[in-house]
Amino acid sequence: MLAEQLQDVEARIQAACARAGRRREEVTLIAVSKTKPKEMIEEAYGLGIRTFGENKVQELTEKQEALPKDIHWHMIGHLQTNKVKYILDKTELIHSVDSIKLAETIEKEAAKRNLISKILIEVNVAEEESKFGIKMEEVLPFIKKISIFPHIRICGLMTIAPFVENPEENRVIFANLHKLSVDITQKNIDNVKVNILSMGMTNDYEVAIEEGATMIRVGTGIFGKRDYKI
Ligand SMILES: *Cc1c(COP(=O)(O)O)cnc(C)c1O
């Protein structure tokens, strides 16, 4: 079942890339394995997937320890400052930086370990009350403030679009985040490259690819529905 679902997602990614005149290599598929057992991750690994996303620190570190070391782990969920120290040397990319305090903590902990932590800024494009992330107009001043941190590398922007019945409704959200990334690139800020656009989930990743996503985060579409009761 997993193999078929993965094939279906892959075919849809390729079709969306073709529609947008983009190369398949421009889009990284992050398999969002949160709440799913290690066996399912191993199955996806066996099918060639090496990039997984988790949204809880403890779950990420447990899976990272138990599973093959060539897996790239992405932290996609809200991150509390007191938990930064557990994941810094275990994650490829933190998608969810949304406060100066969090950036300062990442800087401090990365400096201690003598590493450079790659991050994305989480942007609440739709300004939903229930969501984390900073507002569009706050992004540039925020980037300017944290770009001076030597142990952080700002690599791009991330957004979680609203849940909508028709993914077309999110097209404008993705287009706006893309435009913001172009605007920021034109400012040529030292130490800042906003090449990564992490946007699009099971419901809307094809539209996100058409609007310039370079990373899509797909959970349900690969692993099936999540059961939060277990
Ligand atoms: C759970 C989650 C996803 C994956 O959602 P699906 O709808 O299952 O594809 C993507 N991004 C974030 C931040 C998530 O928490």
Image (tube, rainbow, N blue to C red):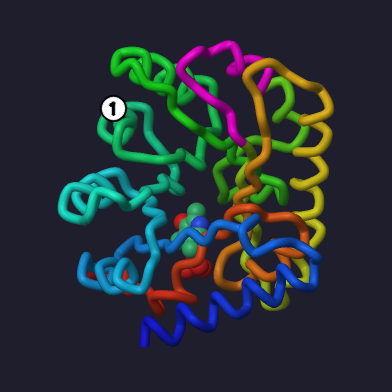
- The residue shown at (38%, 75%) is 223
User: Which of the 4 image quadrants contains residue 92?
Assistant: top left
Magenta span: 143-155
- The residue shown at (71%, 68%) is 17
- In this rendering, the count of numbered labels is 1
Percent position of residue 99, x then y: 54, 27
With respect to residue 96, does 142 lie above or below?
A: above
Quadrant where the image shows the N terminus: bottom left
Foreground: 117 or 138?
A: 117
Residue annotated with mark 1: 85
Q: Residues within 10 Å of mark 1 (few under 14, many from 20)?
A: some
With respect to residue 224, does 21 lie above or below?
A: above
Q: Is residue 39 left or right of residue 138?
A: left
Q: Amino acid at mark 1?
A: Lys
Foreground: 141 or 94?
A: 94
Ligand 1 contact, mark 1 (Cβ < 8 Å): no
